[in-house]
Every structure is written in structure tokens, then in C-alpha cells.
Amino acid sequence: MNGLVYLDTSIILSILLETEKYQVAEDVVASFQDKTFVTSGIALNEAFYVAAFEYYRQRGLVKGRYSFREVIGKQGYPREVVELVLGFVSDLRIKVLEDYYDFKEYIQVMTTYRLLPNDAQIALTCRHYSIDTILTFDEDFKRVPWLKVIPNY
């Protein structure tokens, strides 16, 4: 282990949005405080999207993806959401890695391990940076042999 621990979107959002898994996410993150937290653009992309969608949904401005696109086009990303995500990254001193991408490897990882495209990108990025531990609630990562999934239900 190189001391790097990847924070996946599900952990980030559980903490930021205080979901039903909030306490588990907080405890898991706390147990790795001696490590260097990393994430990548794809995970932050998902976090910004979901957090902004939820922000506007709670205010009755969006019902689905199409209306969300319209609201973003007119109002942009809520300052509160941007500050929330950036504050989280700053508070935990999360290093944001560039997503690694090689088309052939990406297709191989996506098809071999039956992953959604973004998850395949994350798994490939972890392999590229020699990251073997991922904090996530996404059980699909358990099919990836080079990743240790925490928490392990």
C-alpha cells in the first residue's frame, strides 16, 4: 500500500448530503486519517452533479435530468454546492488526481469486470496510480481484483 486511499463519490455524497449512510462514511474516513486521501475528476464530476441536482430538487426547481439541464443553463451551479464540495476537498486535504485514460484498457476494464463507464474509469485511475484501497459504498468495485473495498459489508 502506497498510503493513498481513493474517496469514491458515494462516500463523498453520503457525508455532504448527510444520507442514511452518513455515520458509516464519517467513521470510515476517520479510520483512514493517517493516509493520503485522493479522488479524481470523474468522482468530483459526479459529486457536483448529484449535489446540485439535489439542491434544486429540494427547492422544487427540477424533477428530472432535462429540467436540471435547463436550471443549470439559467442559474448555474449553486454557490453553496460548489463551496460545500470544495470545502470538503480542502478540509480533508484531498489530492485530486488526473483521471488516467487509455481507450483499450478502459474497454477491457469495463467489460471484464462488468462496470459502469465511470466506475471503470475510476478503477483504471486507481490501478495507474497504484492505489489499492477505495472507500465506497459501490459494491461493483468488489469485482476489481486490485482494489480493496472499504467498508466491506
Image: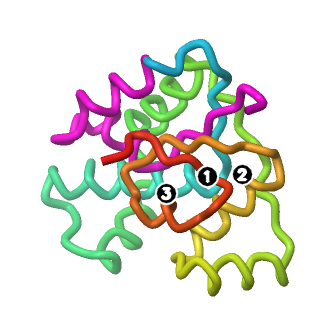
Q: Does residue 82 lie above or below 126 as drawn? A: above
SS assignment at label 1? loop
Residue located beneath label 1 in the image: 147
Question: What amino acid is found at the position of numbered circle 2 in the picture?
Answer: Cys
Magenta stretch: includes residue 134: no
Residue 12 vertical position relative to residue 116 in the rendered view, above or below: above
Which residue was labeled with disc 3? 46
Q: Secondary structure at mark 2?
A: helix
Q: Residues within 10 Å of mark 3 (few under 14, many from 20)?
A: some
Residue at the disc numbered 2: 126
Q: Which residue appears at 73% of the width and 33% of the height? A: 1
The answer to whether mark 2 and mark 1 are in CB contact below 8 A is yes
1 or 3: tag closer to the N-terminus? 3
Relative placement, left or right, of 34 versus 126 is: left
Query: Spatial distance from mark 1 to mark 3, Cα to Cα?
Result: 20 Å
Mark 1 belongs to which amino acid? Answer: Leu
Which residue is found at the position 60% from the left and 13% from the top? 34
Instruction: State the CA–CA distance, disc 2 to disc 1.
Output: 8 Å
In the rendering, which numbered label is found on residue 134? Answer: none
Q: In the depicted view, which residue is nearer to us: 147 or 116?
A: 147
For the point 71% across and 38% down, the residue is 96
Which circle's residue, 2 or 1, is located before the other in the chain? 2
| Range of magenta residues | 1-30
Residue for point 55% across, 19% down? 92
Label 2 vs 3, first from the N-terminus: 3
Q: How many neighbours does mark 2 have within 10 angstroms: few (below 14), some (14-19), or many (20 or more)? A: many
Q: Nearer the viewer, mark 1 or mark 3?
A: 1
